Amino acid sequence: MSTLHKIKCYLYDNVLTENPDDYIARVASERSLSVDDVCASAVTRGGADVSAAAMEHAVNLFFKEMAYNLCDGFSINAGWFTAAAHVRGSFASPGEQFDRAKHTLSFDFVQGAMLRRELDAVTVEILGVADAALSIAQVTDMKTGSVNDLLTSAHNLRIAGSKLKIAGDNPDNGVYFVNAAGRIKVDPTDIVINNPSELMILIPALPPGALYRVEVTTQFGGNSKQLLKEPRTAVFDRDLTPA
């Protein structure tokens, strides 16, 4: 398959290993596209023979019915991806029942064969080492062990990255959960670990039914004695779902 697409990446210090000289690549995403955006592109670029509105309506009907069947325990193989329900957590005995205080029910999505074949048409361009003055590499929901996926309110979230320490007296400094409806700031007293490479916070009550992104804003620049004049913000590039 000939090359049709290009994905651009920056290199970041790999804070998840002890090797000071290795890096990880992160995609320099242009922006997040909605179902409406993709349907409009299918019409204007792809020449779809239905309107964008009709396509969006059909796609939303499909996703709604897919969710209904997933909730009944069916797995979905859509060719482009597979989806299935997954229970996390341990059971102490054969007679123990599912307990939402101890166990977590979620849906797992994995790329399918059709989407995997598209990778042959993609080249990756490394743009060099990013300005890693402040970056988030990974978030872990400590309740479920989920990485870069779930958020369990009233439990801890571990944020790993570079120069994350919350420092300075600017009122904007702190950790936020952000979506289209607004920004929810973590109470400063709920930041239980505050280190340059790691934050541990208590996740606030997050209304379900929405996706969130984590933001960290700080004046820390690598030296606690000499803070930045203006705060900088890092936004984690993954959507997270309240468990």
Image (tube, rainbow, N blue to C red):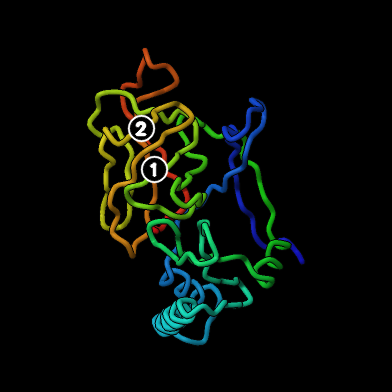
213 relative to 16 in the view: left or right: left
Q: Measuring 45% from the left and 40% from the top, which residue is drawn there?
A: 158
Three-letter amino acid code at disc 2?
A: Val
Residue 222, position in %: x, y?
45, 20
Above or below, 54 relative to 220: below
Q: Earlier in the sequence, mark 1 or mark 2?
A: 1
53 relative to 119 in the view: left or right: left
Above or below, 113 relative to 188: below
Q: Measuring 45% from the left and 59% from the top, which residue is drawn there?
A: 103
Query: Could you tell me which secondary element the residue under label 2 belongs to?
Result: strand
Above or below, 104 relative to 67: above
Q: Measuring 39% from the left and 43% from the top, which residue is drawn there?
A: 156
Q: Nearer the viewer, residue 206 or 134?
A: 206
Label 1–label 2 contact, CB within 8 A: yes
Quadrant of image for the N terminus: bottom right
Above or below, 33 relative to 44: above
- The residue where tag 1 is placed is 156
Three-letter amino acid code at disc 1?
A: Asn
Residue 111, position in %: x, y?
62, 66
Query: Residue 4, located in which quarter of the rendered image?
Result: bottom right
- Mark 2 closeness class: few <14, some 14–19, many ≥20 residues within 10 Å: few
Residue 14, position in %: x, y?
60, 34
Q: Which of 43 and 217 is in front in this view?
A: 217
Residue with the most extreme right position: 1
Quadrant of image for the C terminus: bottom left
112 relative to 180 in the view: left or right: right
Query: Could you tell me which secondary element the residue under label 1 belongs to?
Result: strand
Query: Residue 113, located in which quarter of the rendered image?
Result: bottom right
Marks counted in the figure total 2
Q: Measuring 42% from the left and 16% from the top, which residue is drawn there?
A: 223
- The residue where tag 2 is placed is 192
- What whole-number distance in Å separates the C-alpha atoms at marks 1 and 2? 9 Å
